[in-house]
Image (cartoon, coloured by chain):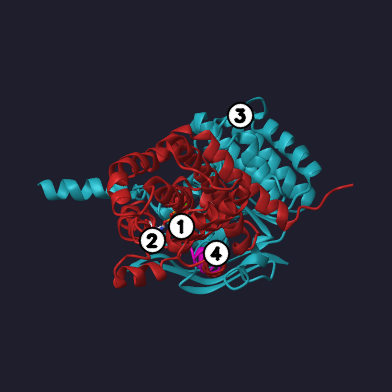
Amino acid sequence: MLSIEVHNLQKRFGDLAAVQGVSFGVEEGSIFAFLGPNGAGKTTTIRMLTTLLKPTEGTILLNGVDPVHHEDEARKLFGIVFQDPSIDEELTAYENMDLHGVLYRMSRVLRAERIKQLMNVVELWDRKDEIVKHFSGGMRRRLEIARGLIHHPKILFLDEPTIGLDPQTRNHIWSYVKGLNKEEGITVFLTTHYMEEADRVADYVAVIDHGAIVAQDTPEGLKQKTGVASLEDAFLSLTGKSIREESAGSIDQMRMHARVWRR
Amino acid sequence: MEKITTTGSIIYVLWLRQLKRYARSRARVIGSLGQPLLFLVALGFGFGPVYQKAGGGNYIEFLAPGVIAMGVLFTAMFAGIEIIWDRQFGFLKEMLVAPVSRLTIVIGRTLGGATVATLQGCIVLLLSLVIGFHITHMGSMFLGLLFMFLVAVLFTAFGTAVASMLEDMQGFQLIMNFLVMPTFFLSGALFPIDTAPQFLKLIAAFNPLSYGVDGLRAAFGAGGHFGIPLDLLVLSLATLFLLAVGSYLFSKIEI
Ligand SMILES: Nc1ncnc2c1ncn2[C@@H]1O[C@H](COP(=O)(O)OP(=O)(O)O)[C@@H](O)[C@H]1O
Ligand SMILES: [Mg+2]
């Protein structure tokens, strides 16, 4: 059975086609890696899958539920770790975790148990009562991940979860996620920049570039197709070696305009 | 026995979140008292003698409910508009993907913001008592609190509705200048509606804050224009309307 079914998904922002007719399926209980260079359209796809953005075209089914028209039902199915920050900085780490648990209607006992367990996994338990404003970038990232895992959803979206974390932490997190996947049959949809991570955890990989899927297969299959030894090389051979700029935030864009004008 | 989390407890945690954020930013509490204090002192003492000579009686008695309403209005709008901050700091995404009805989220936030605004109103009330405001009968305190809370809910919901349509803080100044300031100045907070020219009367009649100011004034014993039952009715209807509009607009947010 398919947990995620996407057909001809498209998203335009004005005249920019960020996602152009993407189709794929994710088998229930599997780990699916969505790989692609910066600006390929990974986050935009996840935003459409998780009710944050309406597709321009195409259909989505999450366990048979259409998130575009049945948002509330779909929201009960998934959990997500966003690429961008989404923590309330004025609250303590524990308060952020607990608020999440309440929003997902978890009982008090289960909340307390899971929060302690996960904050230990990301090594934040002894900092639990500090206001997040005073946390470093890595600590915030770890908190975001822990929070996304509290409620054990049916489908888990992880958008570059481990970016900027040290190898030890990444290891802990991936073994926890793999455990969840094994023991509870949770379907995992992830994006990452670390190819060896994708190679290690994913059952199936799709490579997206310029808003379109250029290949999808098992990691082994991709390596064989492209005739290389590592997933990293397979990725490079599929998407080319040119460097993609991280899409500029509005402030950068303003600075760029300012520069243009001053000349 | 495991207790199931209900919609009530979701509203409670969202309410609590607003209170914690307020309590933890002391600068905000103190900063937002400056303006009401300025109005009380400059207008209250400055215009007091003129008002008295014109036969209006004690101006502070008249002005204080208006300035209390102002404290509530500004804090409530600010609490509603906080959604823009949530958007910029990213927490909005966390709320938007939660399997909670948009109405529940808006109610939780609005009650939280309204509680904060009511507290702020109480602080302004204390300040005005120090400056010379009198409450004629203590029994009316409850009615006064009720009006503060209604004004607070109304304008937090209003702020939420407006902020749901804004992308960033650039629109904020526009809202302050073209919505919040006129709402305050044209509400009868500073001048009696009874004796105002016809066009001002008309504008005030369509301004929901007028009914809040009027209710507060009537509750604290400084007379009234519309009468308490009409005040309560208009404020309640406007609040329900804005809650509905607010949660509709909130449900349309895309990130
Ligand atoms: N809200 C938006 N408005 C305009 N363009 C956007 C918006 N969100 C994303 N984009 C653009 O869509 C493209 C895909 O972005 P994204 O999905 O974030 O890529 P990825 O996650 O693969 O790095 C980029 O060119 C980005 O600038
Ligand atoms: Mg991305």
Q: Amino acid at mark 2?
A: Ser
Q: Position of residue B15 (x, y in %)?
A: 62, 48
Q: Which element type, helix, strand or loop, lies under badge 2?
A: loop
Residue bearing the label numbered 2:
B187
Q: Nearer the viewer, residue B13 or A254?
A: B13
Local packing at callout 4 (Cα closer than 10 Å; few below 14, some 14-19, many 20+) is some
Residue bearing the label numbered 3:
A168
The answer to whether the residues at label 3 and label 2 have Cβ atoms under 8 Å apart is no
The answer to whether the residues at label 2 and label 4 have Cβ atoms under 8 Å apart is no
Q: Which residues are magenta?
A: B242-255
- Cβ of disc 2 within 8 Å of ligand 1? no
The answer to whether the residues at label 4 and label 3 have Cβ atoms under 8 Å apart is no
What is the residue that sits farthest to the top in this orientation?
A: A126
Q: Amino acid at mark 1?
A: Val
Q: Which element type, helix, strand or loop, lies under badge 3?
A: helix
Q: Gap between marks 2 and 4, in whole Å?
A: 16 Å
Q: Which element type, helix, strand or loop, lies under badge 4?
A: helix
Q: Amino acid at mark 3?
A: Gln
Local packing at callout 3 (Cα closer than 10 Å; few below 14, some 14-19, many 20+) is few
- In primary-sequence order, the first of circles 2 and 4 is 2
Mostly what secondary structure, the magenta segment? Answer: helix
Q: Nearer the viewer, residue A248 or B110?
A: B110
